[in-house]
Structure formats: C-alpha cells, structure tokens
Amino acid sequence: MKATDGQGSAVQPGPVLLLGSGETSPTARKIYDQFFAPLQPPVRIAVLETPAGFELNSERVAGRVAEFFRHRLPHYEPAVDVVQARKRGTQFSPDDPKIVAPLWTAEVVFAGPGSPSYAVRQLRGSLCWQAVIARHAQGATLIFASAAAIALSRHALPVYEIFKVGEDLHWKPGLDFFGAYGLELVLVTHWNNREGGEDLDTRRCFMGVSRFERLQAMLPESATIVGIDEHTALIVEMAQARCQVRGVGGVSVLRQGLEQRFENGDTFPISLLGPFRLPRLAALPVGAEVWRSIQAARARRLEPSKPPPQVVRLLSERAKARQRRDWRLADSLRQQIEALGWRVEDTPEGSRVQPRSEEE
C-alpha cells in the first residue's frame, strides 16, 4: 500500500545503514552498492550538513561526502543535494522549507561526522527531521555514520562533552529514531577505536572500556546497547525484520545483561534488539504539512515542461563534460542551470531538466 498523506497506512520503511566510521572508504562503497542497486538511476541523495553545522567548514565536510557519491558511484548517476540545515534561528535553519526541499523526493538520506549532541539539538522536532522520518517510512534508505548514528539513539553519548571538555559521565536524550518501532537503542560508533595506542584506551567511542562500564550502569535495564566497529555497518532492514553486519569489523549487542557478537556477513533477527514492531504512518511524529509537501513534490516531478534555449545549451555542454569525466565542469554547469530555475536529473537515457519549485 502506497502512502501519501500519513493517515492510516502502514509504513514501508527502507533500510538503515549505521556506520561505525569510514563513510567514504572503499569498504563503505561496497556496502552502498548492495543497497543502491535496486534503485533506478538517477539516485536522488540528500546529504545533511547538520551534525557538523557548528563547524566553520561544515559545508566542506558535507561536500566531501557529496563528491564521494558523485564520483565513486557514477553508475547510479547520483543527483546529490547538500541540505544546509546547520542551525535553528539562522538562514540555514532545519525548519526552513527551502533548505529542507531536497528531502521531499530523496531516495537516500545521509548524515555523518560532527557532534551527536549538536545534531540532536538542531534536528529534534524540526521540519528537516520530520521529513527524514517520513521519507524513510515511505522507503528511502538512511545512511547515518559516526556522530549522526549516535544521535539516533534514545540515550545519546555526549562524546565531545566527556572526552574533550571533561564533563561528568552522563547521557543525553537522543532523537530516538527507533522508538516508534518499539526499540530503545543506544548506538555507539567507533566501538573498537585504537587511536590512543598503548597509552590511552579510546575504545567504546573514545570513552575507554572502564569508563564506558560506568556509563552503561547509568542506563535503564530496558535499553539495548549496539556497538559498531570502525569501517563496519549494521544494516537494519525493518521491512524484513532482520539485521546484517558488513565491513571489516563486527557489531556487539548488549541487552538484558547478555552480550552477543556478530561479524562481517552475519545476519540476525531484529527482535534481538528489542520488541520490534511496524507502526502506522499516522503514529509517526510527522505533521500533515510534511506529507502534503512530499506529495506535491512528487506531483511536480511528473509535470512536463519545456526548458528555454539557454538551459538546453548548458545541458548539452554538461553532457559533453560528463562524457570527458570532467566532473568539476559538469558540477559548475549544473549550478548554472539551477540558477536559471531548473533542476538537473541524470537518467539512463541522458540528462534532463525539471523546473525548480519556489521552495527550492
């Protein structure tokens, strides 16, 4: 059943890829291939800038990921948008419909490095976060790495505050993404980190094993800790009620006093994470205006429109640049086309353009 308004229909969630680190590594590329393959090119990808939105180079941080998708996965003809949802109350607010617009039709949503605490503060309850929840429930793939994966937890680890600032051990409320699905998860990336060498234990996301044990004791017994090694992905497939582990390391699941370890290639039922359930769309924390925006954006994509000669010329020049694999020029020409009010879509039959909406 396809849902368009969020009322009554069952969710049809896409997979969630949780990466311990290495979101632009060769290992990650192989993992992405598995889940991009069923998608029809061009694959529409939205890269959230939010987790690193407090950093002066946040645009570059997200831009590197966007470049990775464009240049390392060209056979999917990725149409990548960087969602500049950096900070509430600014011109880059996650509540601004113009900023959020690429999410309405995104097939893949990515978020990565930065601060878990900052990401939670900026996203919780925002228009941007509602859009992410809605698109995932309609089948979009989510790729959340490092800090962004931690932010999805019900109880989020404040890494910077403890490791860098020296605050007392504590947990912060997270985005609780999996709560609607019956799971109380605590996601901990960089589970096997060794940057401290012999002098400093930086396992358990820079906390160290002994300090993390004290943190673990602060959590409610109902919580499930999921530790994800670096360059490793836990793939949560809600529609199939299963989880997969892919990458060079493994995943540790700590629940009700028991620890289970899963390595590359292992598959296990999602019920090992808790009392999993699939909710109705109407039960998700998504406002009616979000469903309407998604429906309207989809309708606009189906409306034919003839571009002016200048746009046709730029599109032709861009096609030649892509044939020469001159990605820098191709990106520049894309920006020129968008500045004229048209969005470029790369398809197996070639590139085409659609008029951009006022929200974009």
Image (spheres, rainbow, N blue to C red):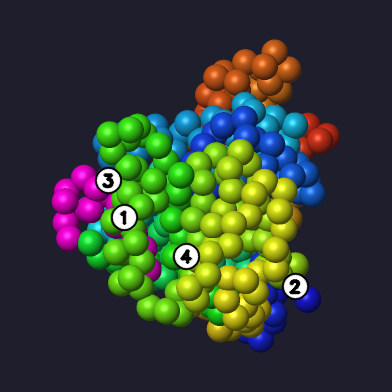
- Give me the disc on residue 225: 4
Query: Seen from this angle, which residue lies furthest bottom?
Result: 8
Where the N terminus falls, by quadrant? Answer: bottom right
Vertical arrangement, residue 23 with respect to residue 280, above or below: above
Tell me whether the residue at label 1 lies in contact with that at label 2, contact meaning CB atoms closer than 8 angstroms. Answer: no
Residue type pointed to by label 4? Ile
Residue 221: percent from the left, percent from the top? Answer: 42, 79
Mark 4 / mark 3, whichever is N-terminal: 3
Q: Earlier in the sequence, mark 4 or mark 1?
A: 1
User: How far from the left and from the top, in percent, is residue 40?
Assistant: 78, 46
Estimate how packed mark 1 is, as few (under 14), some (14 to 19) or many (20 or more) residues with alpha carbons within 10 Å: few
Amino acid identity at mark 2: Lys
Q: Position of residue 95 (x, y in %)?
A: 37, 62
Q: Sequence-wise, which precedes: disc 2 or disc 4?
A: 2
Q: Earlier in the sequence, mark 3 or mark 1?
A: 3
Q: Are marks 2 and 4 in contact (CB under 8 Å)?
A: no
Start and end of the magenta stretch?
155-168
Which residue was labeled with disc 3? 54
Q: Amino acid at mark 1?
A: Ser
Q: Which one is nearer the viewer's eye here, 10 or 266?
A: 266
| Pointer 4 local density, CA inside 10 Å: few below 14, some 14–19, many at least 20 | many
Nearest to the eye among marks 4 and 1: give it: 1
- Give the mark, 3 or 2, whose residue is nearer the N terminus: 2
Q: CA distance from mark 3 to mark 1?
A: 30 Å
Residue 210's disc number: 1
Q: Secondary structure at mark 3?
A: loop
Nearer mark to the viewer, of 3 and 1: 1
Determine which residue is flagged by label 2.
2
Residue 323, disc? none
Of the two numbered discs 4 and 3 in the rendering, the one whose residue sits closer to the viewer: 4
270 or 346, which lies in front?
270
